[in-house]
Image: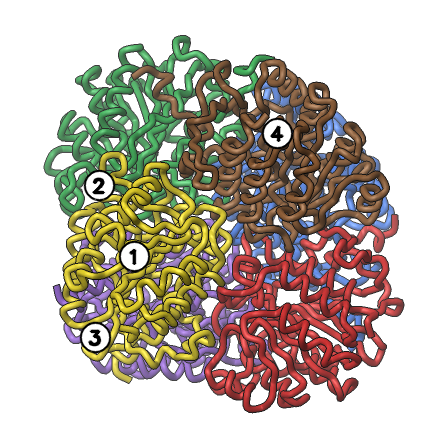
Chain colours: A brown, B red, C yellow, D purple, E blue, F green
Amino acid sequence: MKFDEAYSGNVFIKSHPVFEESEAVLYGMPMDWTVSFRPGSRFGPTRIREVSIGLEEYSPYLDRELEEVKFFDAGDIPLPFGNPQRSIDMIENFVDSLLDAGKFPMGMGGEHLVTWPVIKAMFKKYPDMAIIHMDAHTDLREDYEGEPLSHASIIRKSAELIGPKNVYSFGIRSGLKEEFQWARENGMHISKFEVLEPLKEVLPQLAGRPVYVTIDIDVLDPAHAPGTGTVDCGGITSKELLASIHEIARSEINVVGCDLVEVAPIYDPSEQTANTASKLIREMILGWVQKG
Amino acid sequence: MKFDEAYSGNVFIKSHPVFEESEAVLYGMPMDWTVSFRPGSRFGPTRIREVSIGLEEYSPYLDRELEEVKFFDAGDIPLPFGNPQRSIDMIENFVDSLLDAGKFPMGMGGEHLVTWPVIKAMFKKYPDMAIIHMDAHTDLREDYEGEPLSHASIIRKSAELIGPKNVYSFGIRSGLKEEFQWARENGMHISKFEVLEPLKEVLPQLAGRPVYVTIDIDVLDPAHAPGTGTVDCGGITSKELLASIHEIARSEINVVGCDLVEVAPIYDPSEQTANTASKLIREMILGWVQKG
Amino acid sequence: MKFDEAYSGNVFIKSHPVFEESEAVLYGMPMDWTVSFRPGSRFGPTRIREVSIGLEEYSPYLDRELEEVKFFDAGDIPLPFGNPQRSIDMIENFVDSLLDAGKFPMGMGGEHLVTWPVIKAMFKKYPDMAIIHMDAHTDLREDYEGEPLSHASIIRKSAELIGPKNVYSFGIRSGLKEEFQWARENGMHISKFEVLEPLKEVLPQLAGRPVYVTIDIDVLDPAHAPGTGTVDCGGITSKELLASIHEIARSEINVVGCDLVEVAPIYDPSEQTANTASKLIREMILGWVQKG
Amino acid sequence: MKFDEAYSGNVFIKSHPVFEESEAVLYGMPMDWTVSFRPGSRFGPTRIREVSIGLEEYSPYLDRELEEVKFFDAGDIPLPFGNPQRSIDMIENFVDSLLDAGKFPMGMGGEHLVTWPVIKAMFKKYPDMAIIHMDAHTDLREDYEGEPLSHASIIRKSAELIGPKNVYSFGIRSGLKEEFQWARENGMHISKFEVLEPLKEVLPQLAGRPVYVTIDIDVLDPAHAPGTGTVDCGGITSKELLASIHEIARSEINVVGCDLVEVAPIYDPSEQTANTASKLIREMILGWVQKG
Amino acid sequence: MKFDEAYSGNVFIKSHPVFEESEAVLYGMPMDWTVSFRPGSRFGPTRIREVSIGLEEYSPYLDRELEEVKFFDAGDIPLPFGNPQRSIDMIENFVDSLLDAGKFPMGMGGEHLVTWPVIKAMFKKYPDMAIIHMDAHTDLREDYEGEPLSHASIIRKSAELIGPKNVYSFGIRSGLKEEFQWARENGMHISKFEVLEPLKEVLPQLAGRPVYVTIDIDVLDPAHAPGTGTVDCGGITSKELLASIHEIARSEINVVGCDLVEVAPIYDPSEQTANTASKLIREMILGWVQKG
Amino acid sequence: MKFDEAYSGNVFIKSHPVFEESEAVLYGMPMDWTVSFRPGSRFGPTRIREVSIGLEEYSPYLDRELEEVKFFDAGDIPLPFGNPQRSIDMIENFVDSLLDAGKFPMGMGGEHLVTWPVIKAMFKKYPDMAIIHMDAHTDLREDYEGEPLSHASIIRKSAELIGPKNVYSFGIRSGLKEEFQWARENGMHISKFEVLEPLKEVLPQLAGRPVYVTIDIDVLDPAHAPGTGTVDCGGITSKELLASIHEIARSEINVVGCDLVEVAPIYDPSEQTANTASKLIREMILGWVQKG
């Protein structure tokens, strides 16, 4: 036994040990410094990996096994505490490098603001990209208490970058009146309350296009994901979210990257949210990588 | 800055600071002394206010904002510990005064017995009133262990006061055999297990009538409301409860008062139940006040 | 007052005090020593009994009361810690004796492996029996890390004993690829993801046959049963599981024994899973005993 | 294996199965209905028994084993919910019977009021008895909110019954100014803040006398007993409480009965308080029974 | 009953209702945005008030009652989320006004950085002031990750303002090597590990001087205060902290203001830390106000 | 930025990245399969690393910084679930290799049985070694329920291997009568209840000898370490344990290896035990490595 064999580490189950041989790269973005209500998502990626050892490697939904997809777990990007701007720059650089190396980026938050630099990096490579966004919240604020870099403005900034018409939000049940208005006036798609049925309608329109998918775990009802900063009742079930992931897997869109954000272990005493997140990530790996 | 400006206090988000200018009054009834199984709801109103700071003020369901309704948060009625009779008298006096002042009463429990004095006060003003009751439990006992003042007898006492034919219970999935029989024999309406669909049938029959709505949070499945004294599986989702609130908002009944009871923070480690309760109250404010 | 009157003990609510006069016998099998991920189910039976005092004795679903069925609570079988083989032998002996005495056996786990010796005992008495199995997991492994006695192999061993064609699994959403293959190749029935609808199709085929029903609480979604060792999102609701129990109660199959396993109190901070389990057991008692 | 052998039940570890052959009787008094702040102690006795399976039967402090003392676990007295007077009467009757049968009574609360009927029963048999009381609180109120039967008045009532000069309180760090005054004026002994050192001074004065010892778990600092209704910092360590129990064991007083009250499992997420209580009870059994 | 009588609100027990008539003012500073490890102290003041209802109003340590000191509970200063500079300015203004009005300021954090603006305000009024600081951490960093406004630099900034020789730290058990060096080289007092004994030596040196006392709840061992952001074992007991408060009360120093910071409810499942904080505040009110 | 720079991973804070350059090696032994009461320590090492990011790297006790000692974090040894014998063999091989490479072994459990193979490996290299053992429990059983490989027999087996006279246990407060007898009769040292004072007496006797130190976290009182399988009140404080570590650091014994075992995160809701363990490990690294 050699020492690097001994190391079981804390990586996602069945991740591939060699970066160069991998198709996809999983990475954590442990940042929660712009969160207004209940912080704690900085510990999300570590816990998701930890509980992933309880996962089966086979998906009876997709009839695939984790061994069929090579993904490297790059660990957490060492973001500097309390410094949103530098954190964002580091994430963008990191994803730039992944894309240069031809890898499929797969992020774990952290607060939702971590998606902003990823979108910036993706857009440089895929100028015709669209975004599928599943969330309880619009995240369309121009700023939050005067601060433009906020978890509440991530979709607004992204929409302004790639064009509101290219952004499709699902499951939304919370936001300012002005945010809904802005979306309507700028041609952005918002499906309120539901995910699966409206997604089935939208996916054919996106056939063949490169699409980045960002999932805020709070799109789930608090019954299904209590371990997150902003619980908001009236959400969808984990069954519907799984079905939505599978619907995308079966569609003709070209998923080019994705993330799952806002898992906060401290509000998750029985670890059900972390376990759910780890299964969602398995299905995203099995269903979305190699679709391009 | 003056000192009363400094005070952000612990009031429900966006409550109006002046009693006289308000249409509705929100108040807590922190009593749980007749609870048989798991007490703790006396701390419910305080926690619901505390987490309300995480709420958006806009409802995408009703397309209204909290600023459109003036409601005053009167805090908790200082009920004397362990004395159900005096507590009940204080609540009745309090609601009498609210009704005299022309306010819409909106209570937060506390155990379900707190609704009894409210009903007495309402009935004096609205002798033709009906009650819509959403709950896991019938609450139709004549007494509980020989004690007529009990959380398990609140609907029985109310039905005897205003007439069983004027009481409509929904979502019921627990009770004594005798309770269901009494309801049947006395013409009281009970919809077992479901809320939304039977409610749609009943609402037209109540058009134009003054109706008091009392919601026990345990009408929700424990998945959606673990933080309550008597969890009972097989309940409805928070989505169905929200839809039921909105169905009432869109109906032609005249809601004249309401309450939400039995939130118990100690069984709510991730605070999901308190968060859900605060959102339900927002929807009740936006949907039901000014309907009269 | 005599001393044995004083004793309220920790038995399931309304259990009958005399073994000889009882039709059914409820017993705990407090074993979790082969569990790979999150142990703790050894404390399940004790906690289920403890919270059963919060149950009503009447079922509005079945319109029956616990008093109508005489069941004896035999407590927990004193299984020797860390010794799966001897534990299994003790359980088999215990159930042999129950069957000799003409009792309906009703077990509470413990990990799922405890069902194996029960099946062995049942099969000696009912050589034409079938098994209905509700679970998130296939439990069809030939062995687990080389160990044939494992919670992950209980259905495989049972299927090999009574014939795979006599085993009907429902709600399955996790397992190895090989397990699903083995089931398919050997004519075993597996309904993936759903329980109620496929059960409605299967029950008529089993009319008149003796059937043992084993329920792993993790067939429920983690939202409905966080308190178990292996939470796996995408499961059914407690409403669907209750309806499935009632569907069996109304069917023409001959239930000859049953169990409910894998409740783990340490992951159940608000005790919702234990409460749900105690209600499920009430419905199983009221719906399945005396069906033979 | 016979069925009553199968039953491991939920009794205190190594309790003797036959009442008649036992010297001492352990019993639960699951009542918390007069508690003002945080109820929940009604579930204390059950949980203490449950965790007692983790105890060694040997005490290295006293060099004795549980097998050397025959004690019967009578379970919980089935107290009627919400009825303090009838509960108190039942407890008094129960202890009367124990004393008639020559047994050493050993109670587990429940709130501290349960000690009142025990004292009444003891005093009938031992008119020259003294009380040793360890607690954070004086419990000397004449009434609580007008109610004379209260957990806050138990020592006052006892002192009035047996004479204040016969009551010795230790570890007290909370109470009304009037309570301390009453004690002073009536010759009752109160040691503030400390237990062990003042106890060493008092014990010789009580040599040869029959003494009842009542321990409220909150005499411990919240660090050592978070799982109780009224946590009050500045308390003693579990080491000091153990040493105090052993000091009594080595003294020449004649312990004639004892109790341990106010363990509330809901505030005890890691079960440390219940575990501590079960060890304290083991030491009380080994140190105090047979001392008479 | 009038409506402002009805309001029991969420204020510290026995606080005086009228600002103008009060000697001291209690206020919350709900900020935790510069916290590096485990945030959550923004909810501290609210929870401390909530549990204060379980406190006795009499201190047997000081033989005084809360009624003897008039203190007004001003609620929480409505600090703008995520903006340390503006938050600090608001706190400074608030305390300026308190001092103008001749009130004794008594703050509740929030993270320790909230003490910085208070010191600035105090120093304007008391240029000869000293600081007594009880904490697990030095808090002497020049900056934290380049950010000078940090919970880790509060004592450094204060020492630079009022002179390091006027700052006395106690109970310190964590910090950078450079921080201890800086203290040594600049004549600042640091007592490592202990509080009470070194305090007894220091207090006579400060006789007659105006002193501000700031207590970080983490000076307590995690056993006594698990509910804080940075738990660090090897700390003092709540008994020692109480004794230290009383030692100051009996000394001849002139306490001119004080605070207690870093209570974080989310890490405090049994609420022991919040309860301890509320008792400490009672003792600070009874012992320190009116000492000047 | 390169990808292996990006990886912050889940390693102990300030661990050295290169095995070859390190003096000491930290490794996890995630096994709990022979635990009788409350399992869960298999997750201990991962959680200890996770919270280590909250540690300062400087020890004010020892005036040393983590940078002064090069230690490599080898992660967890991938022990095969449920197979004690193979797990033990893997650990022994692993430590053999460490010793061959001249490294100081530093283990994290897992249950206490993991120390057995470490002792076997150490003894091959240091035939004159002694063991210092801090624990609540004797761990001197010959077997447990007939099983010689058990967490309850680890010290017995070790004493039989290296000679009972070379084993020194401290803080013991639980065990069978026979275990204490065996120790006495075989010349093994047991200090009951206390650690620091008896350690001061023993250390001079061991001057110059190679000593392995094994610490079971339950030597601490449950107040200081609730997060472990077998909590047992009456233990020492974290202050005393820190002082004992420092006493060893200052002594003339030659520490040649060490471990800290039995941290179980599931019983540690506020993570205080994991935080305490991480600080203890820092002090063990700073105080014991390089002592040889």
* Circles 4 and 1 on the same subunit: no
Neighbor class of circle 4 (other Cα within 10 Å; few <14, some 14-19, many 20+) is: many
Residue located at (18% from left, 77% from top): C20
Residue located at (72% from left, 64% from top): B246
Secondary structure beneath disc 4?
A: strand
Q: Is residue C264 left or right of residue B158?
A: left
Which quadrant holds the N terminus of chain A?
top left
Secondary structure beneath disc 2?
A: loop
Report the residue marked by disc 2.
Answer: C148
Q: In the rendered image of this protein, does residue D4 appear above or below residue F167?
A: below
Report the residue marked by disc 4.
Answer: A255
Residue located at (18% from left, 30% from top): F158
Residue A230, percent from left and from top: 65, 46
Report the residue marked by disc 1.
Answer: D52
Secondary structure beneath disc 1?
A: helix
Instruction: Give the label, 3 or 2, closer to the camera.
Output: 2
Q: In the rendered image of this protein, does residue C274 appear above or below residue C144?
A: below
Q: Amino acid at mark 1?
A: Ser
Q: In the rendered image of this protein, does residue C220 appear above or below residue A11?
A: below
Q: Are marks 4 and 1 in contact (CB under 8 Å)?
A: no
**Chain on which label 4 sits:** A
Q: Nearer the viewer, residue F217 or A246?
A: A246
Q: Are marks 2 and 1 in contact (CB under 8 Å)?
A: no
Which quadrant holds the C terminus of chain A?
top right
* Circles 3 and 1 on the same subunit: no
Q: CA distance from mark 4 to mark 3?
A: 63 Å
Sequence-wise, the earlier of marks 3 and 2 is 3
Residue F277, percent from left and from top: 42, 33
Q: CA distance from mark 4 to mark 1?
A: 56 Å
Report the residue marked by disc 3.
Answer: C19
Q: Are marks 4 and 3 in contact (CB under 8 Å)?
A: no
